[in-house]
Image (cartoon, rainbow, N blue to C red):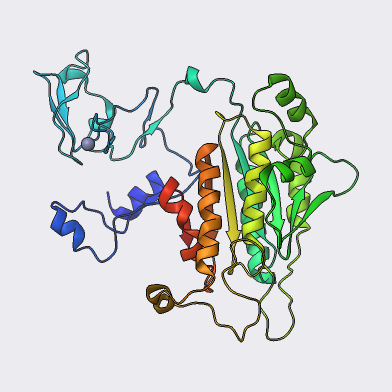
Amino acid sequence: MDFAELEAVEGLRWPWHSWPPTPSAAEALVVPTAVLCTPLHPTAPDLLPILPYPPLRCASRSCAATLNPFSRVNHASARWSCSFCGATANPYPRHLSPDAIPAELFPTHSSVEYTLPPDPSEAGGGPPAIVFVIDAATDGDGLAALKAEVLRVVQGLPESVRVALVTFAASVWVHDLGFEGCARVVVFNGERELESDKIQQLLGVRHSRYSKLAALKATEMQRFLLPVSECEFSITSAIEDLTSMSACPRGHRPLRATGAAISTAIALLEGCCSSNSGGRIIVFTSGPTTVGPGLVVETDLGKAIRSHRDIFNGNVPLIEKAQDFYKKVAKRLTDNALVLDLLACSLDQVGAAELSNWLYRVNEFMWII
Ligand SMILES: [Zn+2]
């Protein structure tokens, strides 16, 4: 099977199709090992097996790789050795005889899908929650393409998934997806760094983590995070009605309150989700933060955005304050089991150095295309 055929089956694209055999070979790679995954890729069950049990993981805490065709199994000692970290004492279930090896050991199954049984410890967390955070200061063509893709993603989500929509430019708009009759948004000033409690209070989603009754009441009242089945029309309309706000005075950058938008999205999930349900925030942006918390560069085009050389030389007066802000963001994310992805589909700089604190701390995605 060639690489293109394999990609059509697995929905995965790799910069390298072989694993570096030694640490020095890994260090010598110019392009790092990575994988691009296609979400919602249609699977072919005959080619890509779906396994109804959890993966067998390497016992090494720092590794946790799964059993795969490159793992060596010793049936006599009921142990398997990890091809990633070299750990050899991983227990192998004795009932799996050499005649009944699991599908993930087949050489042809370099990728498999697992259907995990429900985890009792996660019961009561509610369905997954996703907040789409869209940069309305994107230029018209870019925003039109982005809207089409986000709509496609929303339409492909299971009906039980809860979704919310936050858009931003100079201000931050939280869309009330449960309001009937007309579009309703709650607007926040993009220049201000509000406490999470204050944002939740203004949205009416604040609940006490110590009172189940209060949490229930807040969940019933809030209309910003709703299952797709209940708000597909309103979120679709809100995305379709988004217009570009990239217009700005000559010699200035568009106003873009990315930091305030991210903080608002986190506050929304903090207020609407229980601490064990988690949630995902997906930020789509096309330029640097030019207003409010996490400021990367001022709007005046006469003041150039910092370069790599400036960062290396410590000649970046704004970066310290921005990184302090994103440290707080990272803590809120980890405290609430939230994931924040940043998709910056732009040739312009977006301020990745300022934004990246949460990335190192909580292993999120930052895709700059
Ligand atoms: Zn391992």
Q: Nearer the viewer, residue 365 or 157?
A: 365
Q: Position of residue 42 (x, y in %)?
A: 48, 41
Residue 275 picture quarter: top right
Q: Nearer the viewer, residue 142 or 177?
A: 177
- Closer-to-camera residue (66/199): 199
Q: Quadrant of residue 258?
A: bottom right
Front in this rendered view, residue 3 or 165: 165
Instruction: Mark yes or no: residue 344 visible.
Output: no
Please report the residue visible at 68 percent of the width from the left and 34 percent of the height from the top: 272
Q: Residue at x 63, y 61 (%)?
A: 293
As drawn, is 122 to the left or to the right of 15? Answer: right
Image position of 112 with respect to 350: above or below: above
Q: Residue at the spot x=20%, y=60% of the render?
A: 27
Where 304 sits versus 5, above or below?
below
Q: Is residue 152 left or right of residue 1?
A: right
Q: Could you say where residue 208 lies in the image, as x and y percent from the top left? A: 69, 28
Please give left or right for residue 158 compared with residue 323 in the image. right
Which residue shows up at 52% across the image and 38% down it? 335
Point out residue 12 in the picture as x, y percentages from the top left corner.
38, 49
State whether residue 283 appears in this view.
Answer: yes
Report x, y in % for residue 182: 89, 48
For this orientation, the residue located farthest to the left is 76
